[in-house]
Amino acid sequence: GWTLGKDFEARNATHQMKKLTLAELKEFRDRLYLPIPDSDLEGPDGLPPYYHPGQDSDEIQYMKERRAALGGVLPRRVVRAKPLPQPPDSVYQDMMKGSGKQSVATTMAFVRILKDLMKDPVIGDRFVPVIPDEARTFGMDSLFPTAKIYSPFGQTYEAVDRNLLLSYKESERGQILHEGISEAGAMGSVIAASTSYATHGTHMIPVYVFYSMFGWQRTGDEMWALGDQLGRGFLLGATAGRTTLTGEGLQHNDGHSVLLASVSEACVSYDPAWAYEVSVIVKDALRRMYDASPEHPDGENIFYYLTVYNEPYQQPAAPELEGLEEGILRGMYRYAAAPSTAGARILASGVAMPWALRARQLLAEDWGVAADVWSVTSWTELRRDALAAESHNLLHPEEEPRTPYVTSALAGAGSDTPVVAVSDWIRSVPDQISRWVPGSYTSLGTDGFGFSDTRPAARRFFHVDAESITLAVLAELARSGAVDPSLPAQAIAKYKLDLPVSEALS
């Protein structure tokens, strides 16, 4: 209440005091030396007049000077940065071919793509890898010898790992920002780099890799600000999932970050299962954010959140499917078709894809049920597409209704074919699309604080493993009368699903 007089200033009730009395108005006028006569304050409406010191006054001249220095009366963003030339397709080809017999985690797949992108002679030096901690956990130590870690003084000590091939190397010209254990500090660097296209007229491409649990949960306000400030770049929720990271305690078990990420309109979120999906997503992300298009001549004001995992498994080559890239980018595609008419459809994302494929095998071998398996790369993008279709239909009742992509993609298998969705996230994540899925829909997930044990034990505990998926499919089929109602009970007994985890897996 500064300048408002003794009855207002420094009073706890200031927020509830809405009006000045005539005496208080006069005191306010006198304290600020405003040339307003008493007669103007004592008008019939009881409202004080507006006062303007004049266009030539020192105050108005100062305000005009400051507004001019800041770019005008209304704030506006001037984008001077030129669109970036896109890397050649050859950069992405290794991951499109799969890993052969080698087991590779999707975190490592992304780091391999990043390493190749940083070698690009045109835009390689625009990448800004940001690491708050655990560079070796993510396989990013492979960047140390070439990109080096930025330090304004260079390396002033002998690194404890100096005898290793991939030892810690600092340099005044280093490209990596190694922030120490400070996710808040790392996000500050990300925001600075992600908005440099506007503040400095130079596109930079921040790539922030962190334990997924310590992103949207720990620094969600800064990630919201990243979108609010029209920042562009990549956030990588590594070691993602509630059952995938073992041996580090429940504080690391992330089962909900993709749901938190969905609240930011600027955030494009994906949960890829395969390395080739990561490759397609990264390529399209660079195009959308840093290249020009008729709709977005300066690029799009979006940023990406990719959840990647630390569990290695064999990465398949990209299948020769019609519309594969469109399906990956829009949020889902049929990865494995049933050999005959599908009795059920299994939707899976991220690390749950191998469980879904194993369940498909069990359904066929043990129960004679054919099932499709769909790779859901983004539950959030599917939901946003469906909501956009609903909004359009609401406002354009005279036009042909738009059909959500998830509905049209699944419609071909028949509306009575049950759908079981599974991921390493809480059920609310796949449930985002439930009302647009034709046929019955049930989801499996990892709701709860977590379970500190081996991966198989944790997945059995949450009932998201292959056997539990098989049971869920049989239960849906039994409910609709498509199979003998006794099959679910038989599956529970066969797979020991009713026993404590330690007994069931012994």
Image (spheres, helix red, strand yellow):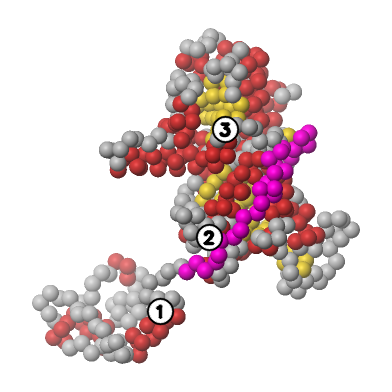
What's the magenta region?
78-104
What is the three-letter code of the residue carrying label 1?
Arg
Q: Nearer the viewer, mark 3 or mark 2?
A: 3
The first of marks 3 and 2 along the sequence is 2
The location of residue 442, given as percent across then percent down, is 50, 27
Check disc 2 and report the residue beneath it. 231
What is the three-letter code of the residue carrying label 2?
Gly
**Residue, x 34% and y 35% (percent of image)?**
401
The location of residue 136, given as percent across then percent down, is 76, 52
Vertical relation: 29 (above or below) 301: below
Vertical relation: 364 (above or below) 187: above
Compared across the picture, whether 429 is left or right of 126 comes to left
Check residue 328 for magenta coloring. no
Vertical relation: 18 (above or below) 137: below
Check disc 1 and report the residue beneath it. 67
Work out whether residue 256 or residue 226 is closer to the camera in this orientation and state it: 226
Vertical relation: 407 (above or below) 160: above
Compared across the picture, whether 365 is left or right of 64 comes to right
Mark 3 lies on a secondary structure that is: loop
The first of marks 1 and 2 along the sequence is 1
What is the three-letter code of the residue carrying label 3?
Glu
The location of residue 371, given as percent across then percent down, is 58, 21
